[in-house]
Amino acid sequence: MIVWVNGAFGSGKTTLAEELHRRWPEALMYDPEQVGYVLREIVDVPTGNFQDLRLWRRQVVTLAVGLLEEYERPILAPMTLVNPQYVSEIFGALDEADVVVHHFFLKVPPEVLAQRIDARTVAPHDPERDEAARRWCKAQIAECMAAADALPVDTVFLDGERPRGELAHEVLTRVGVSLGS
């Protein structure tokens, strides 16, 4: 199974996935963004968004399926994925591979997302790169918010302003993971 934690940049995907992993250590942490970083080192990304590369979408699925087959452990995947075509392509390919995907989307108001993004540091020793990353993330907020309505019908929407412990408990309960007391 894959627990896909989706939402806009700054919504708390990674924070929630880390809390899920702390409570459920047998799950593997798999960040599809890393696949994009590798591809950026190899090929040109004309749009600037590696999700636009068909190869990225294929590799995300291939690696996820491979991890599940080789390690037989559940996967936690924190990744913004809001383009309806890409969501359908990736989740459809996972479904064809008989992979169960539990899809969660963290909803957070745009002004809170902007504050969280402004508070982050991506490249502490490169202020220009750091600011460019923040600008790019903030420029995606409207698209991410609008895309929430086009996500699969089985997407579970969560209030991303709730404490991460509460969110983790809800996610684990919904996916059927019982961790005792």
Image: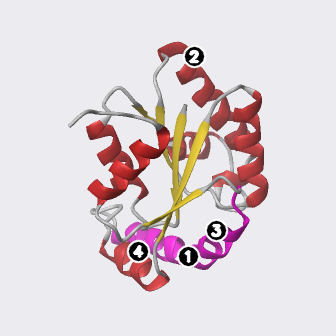
User: Image check: 129 left or right of 36?
Assistant: left
Q: Is residue 119 above or below residue 170?
A: below
Give the foreground label among 4 and 2: 2
Question: Is residue 134 shown in magenta?
Answer: yes
Tell me whether the residue at label 2 lies in contact with that at label 3, contact meaning CB atoms closer than 8 angstroms.
no
Mark identifier at residue 148 = 3
Which sits earlier in the primary sequence, circle 4 or circle 2? 2
CA–CA distance between discs 2 and 3? Answer: 31 Å
Comparing 86 with 156, the one in front is 156
Mark 1 against mark 4, which lies toward the viewer?
Answer: 1
Number of other residues with Cα within 10 Å of mark 2, as a class: few under 14, some 14 to 19, many 20 or more: few
Magenta-tinted stretch:
127-152
The answer to whether the residue labelled 3 contacts the one labelled 1, judged by CB atoms less than 8 Å apart, is no
Q: Quadrant of residue 128?
A: bottom left
Q: Is residue 129 magenta?
A: yes
State the separation of the CA atoms marked 3 and 1. Answer: 11 Å
Q: Residues within 10 Å of mark 3 (few under 14, many from 20)?
A: many
Q: CA distance from mark 1 to mark 4?
A: 16 Å
Counting residues from the start of the chain, the first of labels 1 and 4 encountered is 4
Q: Amino acid at mark 2?
A: Glu
The amino acid at mark 4 is: Glu
Q: Residue at the spot x=41%, y=67% of the render?
A: 160
Q: CA distance from mark 4 to mark 2?
A: 40 Å
Circle 1 residue = 141
Q: Residue furthest bottom?
A: 111
Indicate the secondary structure of the residue bearing disc 1: helix
Residue under the point 34% across and 61% down: 123
Residues packed near mark 1 inside 10 Å, few (<14), some (14 to 19) or many (20 plus): many
